[in-house]
Each structure stands twice: as structure tokens, then as C-alpha cells.
């Protein structure tokens, strides 16, 4: 994808998907800079395949250890195996920790696997602009350049980007992207008071996910 030709599409995708308070003026020098790519990427530990599960290793025991709670308080749901969700969903795993006076205060988070969309596939241009296409580097560079709270995480996947405002970690692998949302709930005052380091939690979830080569 030629950056100048598709810049407006790239920008539109990120303006409509980014938090308003997280936007900043575009740093032109950052656009097209691919120094964030991990040249020591060791390859996939798990390749993308139809019907794969995101819950195989990042299970209740792992979440309980990361959050230092009893495993009995952790609930795991695979939406791809539930009648309540569309069967064509990308692989995902949802986690809940019982906390607070009601389930409205439970901590919620999860992991999802977004397949890399080919340039010739339907919606390929949009996927590429969002960073989920075969030529993803420019889109990731732009994503970082317009976000105040994003930072590159070195030596993780082909590239990794943490967004502090969204509390979201994206890890680019060969053929797919891992998206990790650490478990949290702004309605849970006890959890908010802990001022938890969600970036650290997300990285621990990534390590326990079974997708990352050490």
C-alpha cells in the first residue's frame, strides 16, 4: 500500500476508532518509520487456523495467578463455542472475576485473535488500513503517531503496541494479531483504588497465552 495514496483512508479508520481524548497532532516523522519492528522475532508458536481456540492455555488458573485471586472466582467463556454468539467469530476468550457486591462490578477482559486479511480479499483495503492486512507496517506506524497514550513494547511478536487510555495490548504475529484487554471495571471502586498496572497485567496475560515464543 502506498502511504500517500491511502493516507486519507488510514486516517479515517483511526479517527473513527480512536478515543477522542487520546488523539494528538500527527507526527509526520513517525509515519513510515518502521524501527518499531522486532527484527529478532522468533516466529509463531501457534499458527492461525480455522476453529482454533484462544482459551487453550490462558485459562482460569493463569488469570487467578495474575490477579492473585482464588481460581474459583474466575469464569472463562469461549464465545466461539457458545450458542449465544455468532459461530463465525474470530477466536476469542472472555474472562470474568467475581468481585464486588454484584456481577455489575465483576472484572471483565479477554483475548482475541484477528486473522490477517489478504489484500485481494473482501474489505482487504479497510483491513490493511486498520493494521490487519498483509501490509500492516504503515497502519501501525500511523496508529502510534496519532495516539498520546500509545507506546511500543520492544521484543514482543513482530511488533507490539500498548494503549494506556484504552488499556489494550496489540501484538502482531505472522498472519494474525493478538489483542489483549486486561480484566478491569471502572464501576468496581475496590479495583479502581488498587491503581493496578494494567500494562503489566496485559504482558503477563500475553506470556501465559501460549502464543508467544520465549
Image: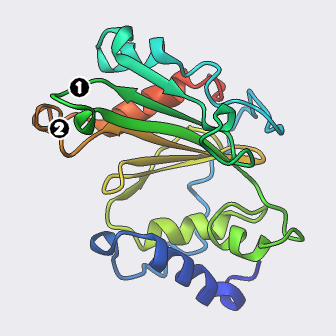
Q: Is residue 31 left or right of residue 195?
A: right
- What residue is shown at x 15% (from left), y 28% (from top)? 101
x, y percent for residue 161: 49, 51
Dot 2 corresponds to which residue? 188
x, y percent for residue 25: 36, 82
Specify the farthest residue to the front: 83
**Quarter residue 34 falls in:** bottom right
Q: Which type of secondary structure does the marked residue at label 1 adopt?
A: loop
Quadrant into which the N terminus falls: bottom right
Q: Is residue 79 left or right of residue 117?
A: left
Q: Callout 1: few (<14), some (14-19), or many (20+) C-alpha neighbours within 10 Å? A: some
- What residue is shown at x 42% (from left), y 70% (from top)? 18
The vertical placement of 164 against 8, above or below, is above
The vertical placement of 30 against 80, above or below, is below
Is tag 2's residue or tag 1's residue first in the polypeptide sequence? 1
- What residue is shown at x 42% (from left), y 35% (from top)? 202
Q: Is the Cβ of the residue at disc 2 closer than 8 Å to that at disc 1? A: yes
Numbered badge on residue 40:
none
x, y percent for residue 5: 71, 90
The colour scheme used here is: rainbow
Q: From mark 2 to mark 1, how far is it between C-alphas?
A: 8 Å
**Quarter residue 44 falls in:** top right
Q: Which type of secondary structure does the marked residue at label 2 adopt?
A: loop
Q: Callout 2: few (<14), some (14-19), or many (20+) C-alpha neighbours within 10 Å? A: some
Q: Is residue 79 left or right of residue 27?
A: right
Dot 1 corresponds to which residue? 99
Amino acid at each position: 500500500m502506498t502511504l500517500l495514496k491511502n493516507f486519507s483512508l488510514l486516517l479515517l479508520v483511526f479517527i473513527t476508532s480512536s478515543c477522542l481524548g487520546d488523539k494528538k497532532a500527527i507526527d509526520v516523522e513517525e509515519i513510515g518509520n518502521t524501527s518499531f519492528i522486532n527484527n529478532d522475532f522468533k516466529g509463531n508458536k501457534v499458527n492461525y487456523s480455522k476453529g482454533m481456540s484462544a482459551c487453550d492455555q490462558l485459562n482460569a488458573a493463569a488469570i487467578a495467578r495474575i490477579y492473585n485471586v482464588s481460581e474459583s472466582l474466575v469464569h472463562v467463556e469461549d464465545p466461539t463455542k457458545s450458542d449465544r454468539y455468532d459461530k463465525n467469530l474470530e477466536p476469542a476468550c472472555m474472562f470474568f472475576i467475581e468481585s464486588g457486591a454484584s456481577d455489575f462490578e465483576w472484572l471483565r477482559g479477554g483475548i482475541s485473535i484477528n486473522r490477517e486479511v489478504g489484500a485481494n480479499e473482501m474489505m482487504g483495503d479497510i483491513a490493511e488500513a486498520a493494521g490487519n492486512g498483509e501490509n500492516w507496517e504503515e497502519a501501525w506506524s500511523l496508529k502510534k503517531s496519532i495516539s498520546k497514550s500509545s507506546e511500543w513494547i520492544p521484543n514482543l511478536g513482530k511488533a507490539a503496541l500498548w494503549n494506556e487510555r484504552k488499556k489494550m495490548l496489540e501484538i502482531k504475529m505472522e498472519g494474525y494479531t493478538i489483542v489483549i484487554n486486561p480484566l478491569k471495571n471502572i464501576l468496581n471502586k475496590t479495583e479502581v483504588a488498587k491503581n493496578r498496572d494494567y500494562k503489566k497485567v496485559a504482558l503477563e496475560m500475553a506470556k501465559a497465552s501460549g502464543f508467544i515464543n520465549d
